[in-house]
Structures are given as structure tokens and as C-alpha cells.
Amino acid sequence: MPPDQAEIDRWTGAAPSWEKHRETIRQMFAPVTQALVKEIGSGQTILDVATGPGEPALSIAARLGPEGKVVGIDPVPEMVAAARRAADRLGLRTVQFEVAFADRLPFPADTFDAVVSRFGTMFFPSPLDAVREMLRVLKPGGKLALAVWWTAESNPFFSTLSGVLERYVDSPPPAPDAPDTFRFAAPGKLRNVLVEAGVADPAERLLEFAIQAPLSAEEFWALRCEMSEKLREKIAMLSGERLTEAYCESLDALRAYQNGSWMSFPGEVRIVSGTKGR
């Protein structure tokens, strides 16, 4: 089995849920998409790495207009199929999706005006090799922008449920530098990867935003459990009274972030960026 196959298998299992909730996920993370693409202009050619079921590639395509072009790649065929279906439904003809790996991009050098990745870098088998590939396919002067999560403690979107379930199910920490949601939470860690890869003008900034969705606490529980295999694995280890206790405790914790018919969580993400030298 290739070293990244286990990670691909996990995302394959999650693909139907990510497609089912695609619009809600797009809405929740729209501020991150806006931060990644704020300097992208109309008519450019953009690569979205680890696009999942099509975001932010689809949002970027709508922003660029008919003269632009967006290519989204993902190693999970089921995610790419979902992205293609979404593009067809939206009638977007300037975006295409391909099955490909971040560290083996199937494009000639100097192809793209910008490369972005929203919440994909944390799961790359070799982030350094992936950034080098992104740099290779960028045109001279092209821009690279990556979004990764800050700490679990600063993102209750994740920590609220995981914190409750960890009191019921033992959860050992991931191995050092293993693919994980918070792999690049430490300040400067991903920026140092960009420096080693040869990215020019590397920069890092903290994006604070609100993760909002028109969901009840009960609906958010269902959404997160469908999106996350780790949560599903923990829940599967509980039964009967213990599961009921964990569910009720989770809802109590989630209601602290409920505002009427909406859930709203403070979110903190690192935007790490740079350019390809001319």
C-alpha cells in the first residue's frame, strides 16, 4: 500500500458526506476562500490543490469570469467526481477537475498565475515536495497561498465535540508531524517549509473569522460526525447509556455557539503565502 493510501481511503469514505453538505461547507469557510484569492484578478489561470468536492475552485471560477481558468486537483477520485457534478450543476465551463497528487502535479512548468490550497497542506505526505511542485508549475512572479488551521483550542468548531468525546474514548495524540488537522498550528512551521522549498517573499498571517451555518446544535452534531471519520470511529466505540450521555453533553456544549437558528464559532486560520521568483 502506498504511504498515503490510508489517508486517501479515509477521505474516500467521507466523500459522499462532503458532497451532501457541499453548500454548507462552502458557506462556513467562505471567509478563508476570500482571504486566499483576494489578490487574484480576472482572466488568470489558477490551480486549487486538494480541492475535495470542488472548493474553493468553484468559488474562484465564479470570481474570475469567462476569461479565467481554474483547475482543481485531488487524489481522491470520489471527491473529483463530486466536484465535476457540482460544476455541471452550476454551469461553470471555465473550471476542470483532475485526479492528481500534490507532490506529483501533471502540469508543465510555468503554467499557473496562482496556486492555492485550503486545508489540504496538513494532510500531504510530504509538504515540502508538494510546495516545490506548486512552485514549479507557477509562472515567474506567480502567487502561492495556503490555509491551515491554528490550534484546536482556538477553533471550537473542532474542539467542542472532540473535547467531549475524549472524556469517553481514549484519544492518543498523533505522531509528530503525522497528517493531522493541526499539523501546522505552530507559528512559522509552514512558513519554514516554504522557505526551504525556495518560495520568495514568504509571509504568514492569522485570519480570525466566524464559522457560521444555518444549523441547530443537533444538525451540527450530525454534520460534523458525517464529515469526520475520527469522530465516527469514537462514536462507534460507545453504545447505549454512554452514547446517550456523550450526545447530550455534546449538545449542551454546542448550544454555547448557537444564535437563534444559526451556529457560529470563532475560527482562526493561518494564511501562509509567497511568490515564485522572476
Image: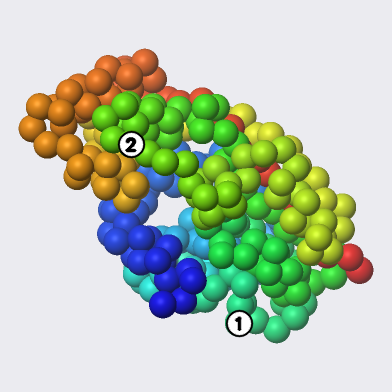
Disc number lying in front (1 or 2):
2
In the image shown, does 62 or 138 lie closer to the viewer? Answer: 138
Q: Quadrant of the N terminus?
A: bottom left
Q: Which residue is located at x 49 percent, y 71 percent?
A: 3
Q: Is residue 252 above or below residue 88?
A: above
Q: Label 1's element?
A: loop
CB contact under 8 Å: marks 1 and 2:
no
Q: Which residue is located at x 68 percent, y 44 percent?
A: 271
> What residue does disc 1 label?
106
Classify residue 122 as left or right of residue 232: right
Q: Which residue is located at x 40 percent, y 66 percent?
A: 6
> What residue does disc 2 label?
170
Q: What is the crowding at mark 2: few (fewer than 14 residues within 10 Å), some, or many (at least 20)?
A: few
Q: Label 2's element?
A: loop
Q: Where on the picture, by quarter, is residue 182? A: top right
Residue 42 in sight: yes
Q: Where on the picture, by quarter, is residue 254? A: top left
Residue 95 in sight: no
> Which residue type does callout 2 highlight?
Asp
Q: Position of residue 172 (x, y in %)?
A: 42, 41
Residue at the limit of the structure toward the right, as seen here: 278
Q: Is residue 43 above or below residue 171?
A: below
